[in-house]
Amino acid sequence: MHVENVSIASIAKDIPTPFYCYSYSAIKENYLAYKRTFSQQDTLICYAVKANANQAILKSLANLGAGADVVSEGEIRRALQAGIPANKIVFSGVAKTRDEIAYALVHNILQFNVESEPELALISEIASAQNKVAGISIRINPNVCANTHAKITTGKSENKFGIPIAKAQSVYQYAASLPGIKVQGVDVHIGSQLTDLEPYKQAFSKVAEFVAVLRSDGHNISIIDIGGGLGIDYHENETPPNKEEYAQIAQELLGHLGCKIIVEPGRSILGNAGILVSSVVYIKKGEARQFLIIDAGMNDLIRPSMYDAYHQIKPVEHTTNTSTFYDVVGPVCETGDTFTKQRELPTAQAGDLIAILSCGAYGSVMSSTYNTRLSAPEIMVKENQYSVIKSRPSYEEVIEQDIIPHWL
Ligand code: LLP
């Protein structure tokens, strides 16, 4: 198995497993596909930093002209440090704090995607104190079903996100009355890993109607942020949702409004551009199951435990023609540390390298040091070269973070 022109086995000779490995060219191609498909409209692609916040990845996207969708001061700092200009940064999230808002205002970001009235009041207060004007969109909750996992559905009325359209009209009036606030757009994001485009149609139609209402109320709406969420193919032989069709839907339903379109893709840029490489530690033959015990755990990749997510698992080197049904499990002391159950895989032995596919998004960023396991390093490959883009910390560095009180 190779990433671009570099064999995974050769990387594993230098870097102990587990490690994440990304293809620069795949990231670039996925980003450029958005540029191409949205070329009919004035569009800003704000990569959702939460999907993978590594500086090398942000720098790659910054060099291609990407903006950033961020959800914390930390992500603003990461985006700025990687060279994404502030005027291409939109700030999402339900719990922006005073300090975070102040930081974003000092740096003159493009827009706050506002989630509530108290947040509006706070932005107004801080902007006024700084003598700044904050550009805002209000995130509306269109109450559409995204047909995705419940934990990553965001556009239903029972979700904590956005403001229901019925109420949003008056919240826009309120926003327009506040000092230091410039109403400039409408924002919507209905969920993640959408494989069906129908929910987007419903949401964008509601947004279009709502923009007309806002304009008749006298608001100057020049931006529509359509969020992210376009899914990827995790399964073999699955057809990923079509980016062209997605852009077409946006064009058909929103194009006539003459607004700048912001798109916030995360997973569809990074997801299939990264793998998690691991080694088989033991094969354990249980009474009912055979366990393929690997050196990556739920602390490295939590998606299977948290969302019952399916990831393809492949041997890095083909050494056998036989197959076995395995439960693939990690080292963490929890039964939930299971990547898959009863999956037919090439028969493996201790020491074999395996790759868990489609891990570029929501992999490394969601990792932890649970069980005092060191975070997996990240590697980026471009053509025939590779670099470590995040190193593995030492045990000393991890343990050093704890402080024993002087009175103990
Ligand atoms: N914009 C907003 C406001 C979001 O909340 C998200 C993702 C995105 C954009 C990017 O969505 P994407 O294009 O990546 O689907 N940890 C979960 C996914 C959480 C998504 C959270 N919000 C997972 O591993 O499936």
Image (spheres, rainbow, N blue to C red):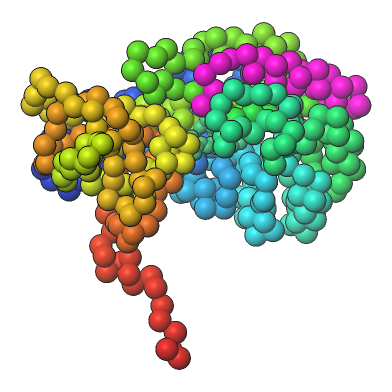
Q: Position of residue 371 (x, y in %)?
A: 33, 59
362 with respect to 44 (left or right) = left
Residue 45 in sight in this render: no
384 with respect to 87 (left or right) = left
82 with respect to 353 (left or right) = right
Q: Position of residue 176 (x, y in %)?
A: 87, 39
Residue at the image point whose x is 70% and y is 20% from the top: 203
Q: Position of residue 292 (x, y in %)?
A: 21, 38
- Quadrant for the N terminus, please: top left
**Which range is magenta?**
193-220
Q: Quadrant of residue 173?
A: top right
Examine the rendered structure and indicate whether residue 219 appears above or below residue 54: above
Examine the rendered structure and indicate whether residue 167 appears above or below residue 215: below
Examine the rendered structure and indicate whether residue 256 appears above or below residue 334: above
Q: Say if the magenta span includes residue 213.
A: yes
Which residue, as the protein is rendered here, is positioned at the far bottom? 407
- Quadrant for the C terminus, please: bottom left
Q: Nearer the viewer, residue 87 or 7?
A: 7
Q: Nearer the viewer, residue 389 or 322?
A: 322
